[in-house]
Image (cartoon, rainbow, N blue to C red):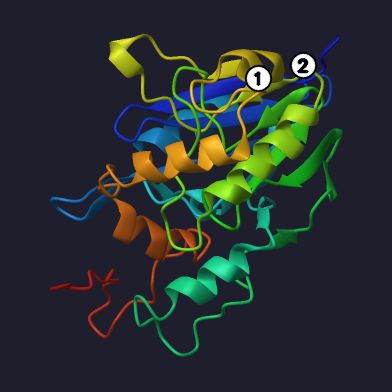
């Protein structure tokens, strides 16, 4: 019998799923992949998405121990740091390979020389197969690179939170054309890690793009993915997947919030330091 309870929150602007996982007997909880709303037209930040999560936590008298980030998202800003203003004991955790992404993007945005590329902005850097205890909740970390080199999935009891590695069966897998992304690595992550878990393991995805306008779906199983994933079934070969993923990615546009998201998310949700007028700025490199 499953002990944990899982509540989802859907941000329709970015198609992002945020989860609160809690133990109803102890009220210990974790938050996975929270959103900080951002309007690119006005460069205005708001907390509408986060406010729903906070309200749920308070209504149920939960004690959130961690914000878990599956990776440095390229399609939404993370509100992870804002939770500390409300729940002072909370910590932000991510897979330790985030340092590879920080090192990759520091020169892209010509970030300050003192920007730390060793993960110092995060409270906890998780290792492969590390078990993190959030009170009574036991979280096992799996590195599932491919979409980015720093992607991690989190197993809590029989529930796996996969970030952008894999989506609902009718949506396939995450794209692999971001810097240091790899279709080969994603194939290995899914087939050698996710697909080796018991078929009944529940999968909770980070995005649902609602193909053909269908209703929101966010929960599937390892068995369903192996049998029905339109891009990577159990019998799909590595060569087939790499060929498909490479051709598919070549047709995709960049996420509309790519540039602001990366700059905030590799800082663990911190804004850039304010300039002498008291305002923080993100950079938009011009290309010709």
Check the image and name the residue furthest to the bottom.
113
Q: Name the residue under label 1.
A: 226
- In the depicted view, which residue is nearer to us: 182 or 89? 182
Q: In this view, does 288 lie to the left or right of 29?
A: left
Give the total number of marks visible in the rendering: 2
Residue 282, horizontal then vertical, whole percent: 28, 68
Above or below, 101 against 234 in this view is below
Q: Which corner quadrant of the image does residue 239 belong to? A: top right
Q: Residue at x 38, y 72 (%)?
A: 272
- Is any part of residue 146 visible from this angle? no
Disc 2 marks which residue? 199
Q: Quadrant of the N terminus?
A: top right
Q: Dots 1 and 2: beta carbons under 8 Å?
A: yes
Horizontal side of 267 relative to 197 (left or right) equals left
Residues 62 and 262: in front is 262
Dot 2 crowding, Cα within 10 Å, few <14, some 14–19, many 20+: some
């Amino acid at each position: 019998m499953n002990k944990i309870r899982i509540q989802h929150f859907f941000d329709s602007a970015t198609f992002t799923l945020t989860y609160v996982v809690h133990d109803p007997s102890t009220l210990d909880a974790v938050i996975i992949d929270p959103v900080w709303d951002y309007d690119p037209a006005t460069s205005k930040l708001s907390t509408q998405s986060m406010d729903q999560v906070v309200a749920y936590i308070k209504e149920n008298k939960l004690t959130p121990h961690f914000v878990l980030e599956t990776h440095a998202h390229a399609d939404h800003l993370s509100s992870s740091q804002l939770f500390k203003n409300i729940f002072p004991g909370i910590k932000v955790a991510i897979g330790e390979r985030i340092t590879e992404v920080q090192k990759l993007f520091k020169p892209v945005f010509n970030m300050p020389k003192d920007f730390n590329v060793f993960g110092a902005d995060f409270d906890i850097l998780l290792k492969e197969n590390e078990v993190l205890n959030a009170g009574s909740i036991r979280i096992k970390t799996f590195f599932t690179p491919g979409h980015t080199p720093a992607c991690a999935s989190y197993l809590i009891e029989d529930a796996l939170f996969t970030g952008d590695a894999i989506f609902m069966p009718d949506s396939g897998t995450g794209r692999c054309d971001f810097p240091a992304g790899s279709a080969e690595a994603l194939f290995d992550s899914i087939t050698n890690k996710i697909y080796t878990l018991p078929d009944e393991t529940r999968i909770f995805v980070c995005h649902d793009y609602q193909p053909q306008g269908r209703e929101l779906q966010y929960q599937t199983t390892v068995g369903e993915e192996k049998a029905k994933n339109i891009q990577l079934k159990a019998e799909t070969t590595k060569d087939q997947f790499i060929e498909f993923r490479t051709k598919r990615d070549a047709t995709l546009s960049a996420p509309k919030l790519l540039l602001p998201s990366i700059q905030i998310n590799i800082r663990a949700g911190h804004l850039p330091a304010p300039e002498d007028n008291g305002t923080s700025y993100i950079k938009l490199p011009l290309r010709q």
